[in-house]
Amino acid sequence: MTRPALRLILLGFFLISASSAPVKKIFTGKETRKTQDVNIYSFYINSTVTSRYATTIITSRVANRLNESQEIFFEVKIPKNAFISKFRMTIDGKSYDGVVKEKADAQQQYSQAVSRGQSAGLIKSVGRTLEEFKTSVNVAALSKVTFELTYEELLKRRLGKYELLINAQPMQTVADFKIDVHIHEKPGISFLEVTGGLSTNDLANAIKTTRADSDAWVTFYPTREQQTKCKDCDKNGLKGDLLITYDVERQNPNGEMKVSNGYFVHNFAPSDLPRIAKNVVFIIDRSGSMSGKKIEQTRLALLKILSDLSEDDHFGLITFDSRVDLWKRELLKATKTNLDDAKSFVRRITDRGATDINAAVLEGVNMFKRQPQAGSASILILLTDGDPTSGETNTERIMSNVRKAIGSKFPLYCLGFGYDVNFDFLTKMSLENNGVARRIYEDSDADLQLQGFYDEVAVPLLTDIQLNYIGVSNLTQTNFALYFNGSEIVVSGQITDNNVESISTEVIAISKGSKVTYQNTVTTKDVIDVPSEHEDFVERLWAYLTVKQLLDKHVLLEGPEKEAVKNEALKLSLKYQFVTSLTSMVVTKPQEGDVEVADKPKEGKESHRPPVSRYYESEADVGMIYDYDEGPNMAPTYGAPTQSVPAVPNNRFLLPADGQPKPLCFDVPIPHKLKLLQDSALGFSMNGESMASKAGFQQITIHYKTNHHLTINTKSINYNDGQNNVQYLWGQKRFLHNYEGIILILRDNKMDVTFGNISVVIVLHKKRKDVFLWPAVRQQPKDVTLAGILGKDKISYEEIQGSTLKIMDNDVKASWDEMTDYRSASAPVVRCWLVPFQAVMNGEISDFTVTHM
């Protein structure tokens, strides 16, 4: 993780393909790309940052050079924390604007497309901080289209810096390529730096930076020739980023107040304070799933973090699997002797066993209770990569136990390692205890990500912060447990009396054991010097921050309070046209009958939906929906899957029914990398990578404990036991491997695999010219619920009436359909109730995808 700050990421990336008769395609990447048919003749990013609130407009103008119509794609990458607030397409002088609606209204209008679960996937995760927005439109011969996307975000301060990361890779040189950034900060800009791949080689000459006391301008106008000369650029044009890093002057310890159009924002970030000694307990998951690089990187990060502790800090170390072990029962002072002893303990941490999160966190709380440290700040940091699988495994009960034990006395920070972790659970548990959850990505820099997070909370300056205001209402959060050096507290609200001439602020907090008070008064008549098009930025900043905080509250509340918070967040989302988890953006396209649906993925999970799907409605006014996943605890509703031939290829899975003669089946659009089967307690996982454009899998991998790895593709079988690597080919004579509970049997076109008490079979199918794999579960542990697409061995349902089934207390529309059962070599055709994926898997497809095989 790059240490400086939350990033605002602006990325323009265009993939162009043509779809007409005859079909023409333009590919990117390793494929041959034919750019002569489509011309991006103008690409413009304009970002205005006023008092940390960024409004970004990406405009692309594209011409169809063909003498026939073709489909042109618009694809950009935006920050995960941003709200899209406007989208427009202009063709032949006519504009098509997006309208934000309540999600239920939008989905009712397009129920057929939504219920099939095979939408275009127009928003998907593409890394740690990015989401990809994608749409397309059919453009007539020799015509032009203009795409314009606007999104908004409040920049967060981390480690004393704000970052604006602008990434551009249009994949062709553009005649009119411009990036304009204007930063306006009333107290003054203390420093500004421009780095990144787009500042290298000849491109450095295309960057111009201008600074005044309160303003900074960064422009990037590369020529066609310069667009091929950066570090990672090639003949296809720009490929890289600009990194703009800055901070503001902080001469007033009372903070910075801005008033505009009946709203105010208060930025509070004092720095001239003594650091508060901290008590920190690290709770480290050492279960079997942490094997290999995860545990190695965790050790590296802990060794560096221990070296950074101050001598007046106290600390503790807890490791856990199905058993909880303490380095020492008490918190110890961070002396050299204690740190050396702790480092020896860390170097000996090894992976094993299951995951008892409940007992581990409660033991961390007990360490603080046994040895309270007056005048210090206590912090719990939990690092885990999986679900609770030992001890108390009910997540609701675990959260209740932890909440009661902590009692709002100190924050709990949860770090989720990798994609298989139950991040919703960690997020809710952190929010309930005044902390945050952060995903640690399984990359080569995971140890730096861990260390970077610790750096953000390493220096507490204030505790028990309360901000008070007179003459205002509808305030955002005003109570904060801790304030860390290099961060910032932001509060916004409405001015209730238009005749009030000033606003008084008071901040009360604890600084190293003593009470401190900050007071300030600002006049409401001060006019903020900002461009007229951004004069409402304080109001929009208030709305953005309010909606974000309401959505967090919605996760925590139950009953009428939960519904009230949801309604308030929805009202604001609709008023300010924000696309949030409660709203969808509907865009009417010029092609009659064309429907596309996009889901915003959950944090850290990739959406691997197919690039484009078509659905046809009877209504004339149809369009596209851009929406976000439902937040936690929202009851799902399922419509009827269509019985027509799917618009995109699918893998169809069969699910036997408990007590019913008719099985269920469900579709997963391809391509995907899927979590097929997982038992965290056993240390077993099986993942499958589907074929690119047809049914079946091209590769299946199985991992068992720490050192057994089996990779099966359509040509060979590779097995590694940690010391030896052997390879077998499909079609060779039969073989048998049987050692220490691991049994591998190859016979003809079938591979039988047994690891411990889990047995699966991988079938190789040869269908005309198509060759693919298909997995099936033969045996699984009794009374154990396995994760993954194949984790359910059967399911119960009840036929209510007609084609309506009751599954897990939900009424589900189904259709009587057929499928080919590839679990056996004969591949018989069977009949089944076709139901939506979500109805039987109790989650989104993105919940079952992996990034690494």
Image (cartoon, rainbow, N blue to C red):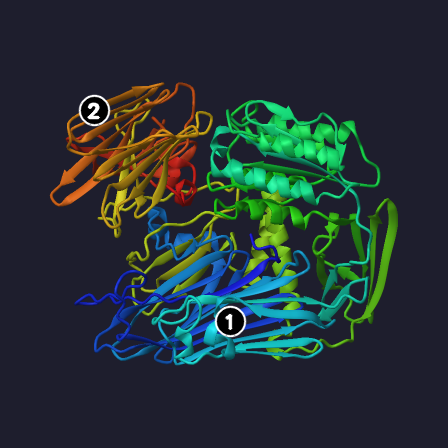
Residue 254 seen: yes
The quadrant where residue 88 appears = bottom left
Circle 1 crowding by C-alpha within 10 Å: few under 14, some 14–19, many from 20: many
**Residue 199's mark?**
1
Outermost left residue: 768
Describe the element under mark 2 as helix, strand or loop: strand
User: In this image, 643 relative to 417: left or right?
Assistant: left
21 lies above or below 62: above
x, y percentage for residue 729?
20, 34
Q: Is residue 427 left or right of residue 405?
A: left
Name the side, left or right, on which 249 lies relative to 348.
right
811 vs 26, nearest the viewer: 26
756 and 635: which is toward the camera: 756
Type of the residue with mark 2: Phe
Residue 174 higher or lower than 470, as above or below: below
Q: Residue at x 58, y 57 (%)?
A: 571
Is residue 82 positioned above or below 413 on the image?
A: below
The residue positioned 39% from the left and 81% from the top of the image is: 175
Q: Which residue is mark 2?
A: 735
Who's the residue at 70% across and 41% down the image? 411
Look at the image and tell me whether residue 400 can be seen. no
Can you tell which mark lies on residue 691? none
Which quadrant, please, contains the C terminus?
A: top left
Report the residue at 21% width, 75% height from top.
Answer: 68
Rendering coords of residue 209 (x, y %): 59, 78
Q: Amino acid at mark 1?
A: Ser
